[in-house]
Amino acid sequence: MNKLIANIFSNGTIINKIILILYLFISLETFAKADTIPPLTPQNVKAFGYENHIDLCWWNNEEPDLAGYKVYRKVSGQFYFYTNVSKEKSYLMLSNLGLNNTQTFKVSAYDSSGNESPLSDSVVATTHIMTDEEFFDMTQRATFRYFWDYAHPVSGLARERLGSGETVTTGGSGFGIMALLVGVERGFTSRELAKKRMIKILTFLTNKAQRFHGAYSHWLNGTTGQVIPFSQYDDGGDIVETSFLIQGLLAARQYFDGSDSTEIQIRNLITNIWETVEWDWYRRSPYSNYLYWHWSPNYGWQMNFKLIGYNETMITYLLAIASPAHSVPANLYYNGWASSSGYFINQTYYGYKLWVGDPYGGPLFFAHYSFLGFDPRNKRDNYCNYFFNNRHHTLINRAYCIANPLNKVGYNENTWGLTACDNPWGYSAHEPFVNDNGTIAPTAAISSMPYTPNESISALKNFYRSFYSGLWGEYGFKDAFNLGANWFANSYLAIDQGPIIVMIENHRSGLLWNKFMANPEIQPMLDSIGFIPDTTTTVEDINYSPDEFQLYQNYPNPFNPSTTISWQSPVGSRQNIKLYNSLGEEIDTIVDGYYEAGKHSTLYIINSSLPSGVYFYQLKSGDFIQTRKMILMK
């Protein structure tokens, strides 16, 4: 290049010399204006040691020319470059480290011009045996990343699942908004960053996202806001998904309660969205007792899906009745939502009474989606206290997995939880006896944490300790696993991740319950329906004291060779259960001993030499005698 320049100056024409001079001037000017200012050093850098891995985290840098981050690791007393991290992420996870492994890090940021910030202060973490609180922190921190780092970059809404690209989900975004509140409370991000994210989300929902009589679609494009059809006729408003979104927005409206202009704007934008949902339109007719799930501008009411319980849509009726601008009559709660003859079943399974719901409770997400914000404690409708009902639903789901009547691989007292999730063959709503193909979803047990803290934390620990390599990833627990098929999902779904972080927090602090219930529209709605105060229902207060002896029907029945027998006693006493054949001859003693007042159950395995047929089992305590029939079918 130097020889070329010299040649032009020595032998070139006047025009060539002028062009060269201009070229050199522009090049020097460009060089002089080149970006030499490095980005800011990453803030709030922290490292957390767990049992199998270490999380390195920082608050994301929002400078527009940010290109990414560099992580340096200490080796033999010196820091060496370890890896790059993309600008979309504010964390690094180091896996499979084993216990007592200590790592020290520093982090820098670099921009598109190659400028690198000064290194952060060093942070150190050591893997160790964890406490329950550390398990909660670990799970919430990782799950939060799905809604923070993996959110759609334009809208800020939650992607439907890992790899879904432009497809964002309305209901899952409502769950994700609640996750943002947890993130601020737990220090996973700052309040200022969360406020900016909320403004991005609310501006998109207000100005870009398609609405259909105020309702949003199930899926929409995260850049354009246009509907992405969920199915052929489901290309319009989805009032159920919208209710999940509004549940999250109303919690956020109470959370961002500051007097600065941004928090005021957040509240105003949420109020505008809330008050422009036309819940009454989704009644379809002013004479209808029901809400309808879908409406399409192209197909009208073609889907024709009435919302009738019991399922995940209770929150839809609650919000429709509570709406300040487009409410529906309160009598739709009983005349529509709770109108099915099968709503109040009042049955006992594995020793646990289920007041409302499907037999055995159905998939566990029924106990989660409507109750992320709506607090079921301390109140009841005409049928039940839903905290108790959700607790028993969860315990029935667990007891079914322990009894394992379909002989699925791996089910036990700490490996349980049937709900809607991915499976080796697709996606399905799994529940006891229905679509039970051996697939366990971590969200099922973990999201029931407020109802069954002891059982749920034991399951969480087991999922992490027993299945870490297949089940844990950068966004926490993956969607599901099936030991019989030797299968672990690679997927994460917004509607499964959201309840995990939210319900752990409701167990720990009641944050989302408290914020949602503080909205001024909620208590009048409950009063209009007829909810009344009920006993205090923290788990510690649940000491079930039956007022009579009762022997329950064994399950499964018919059976071979094992079945669960449950009973209750009002007082502590000596109790025995004996087995008789059809001739009345005593065959076996199933139970014989002193039992305190309460519910009891035992797994009975019948003698393999006994033939198929009808048998009778009898509970006796003092003067009380009750007999039931069981069928052995080989």
Image (tube, rainbow, N blue to C red):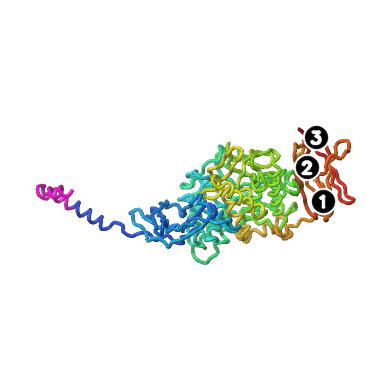
Q: Residues within 10 Å of mark 2 (few under 14, many from 20)?
A: many
Element on which disc 3 rests: loop
Q: Is residue 627 magenta?
A: no
Q: Residue 574's x, y, as percent?
A: 84, 52
- The residue to which callout 3 is attached is 610
Give the residue at x 48% y 45%: 166
Q: Residues within 10 Å of mark 3 (few under 14, many from 20)?
A: few
> What type is the residue that disc 1 sits on?
Gly
Residue nearer the viewer, 59 or 220: 59
Q: Compute the Cα span from label 2 to label 3.
A: 18 Å
The magenta stretch spans which residues? Answer: 1-21
Element on which disc 1 rests: strand
Q: Compute the Cα span from label 1 to label 2.
A: 19 Å
Quadrant of the frame with the C terminus: top right
**Is the Cβ of the residue at disc 1 closer than 8 Å to that at disc 2?**
no
- The residue to which callout 2 is attached is 554
Instruction: Single out the mark in the foreground, 1 or 2.
Output: 1
Camera sees residue 329:
yes
- The residue to which callout 1 is attached is 593
> What type is the residue that disc 2 sits on?
Asn
Q: Residue 509's x, y, as percent?
A: 61, 61
Q: Residue 247's x, y, as percent?
A: 60, 54
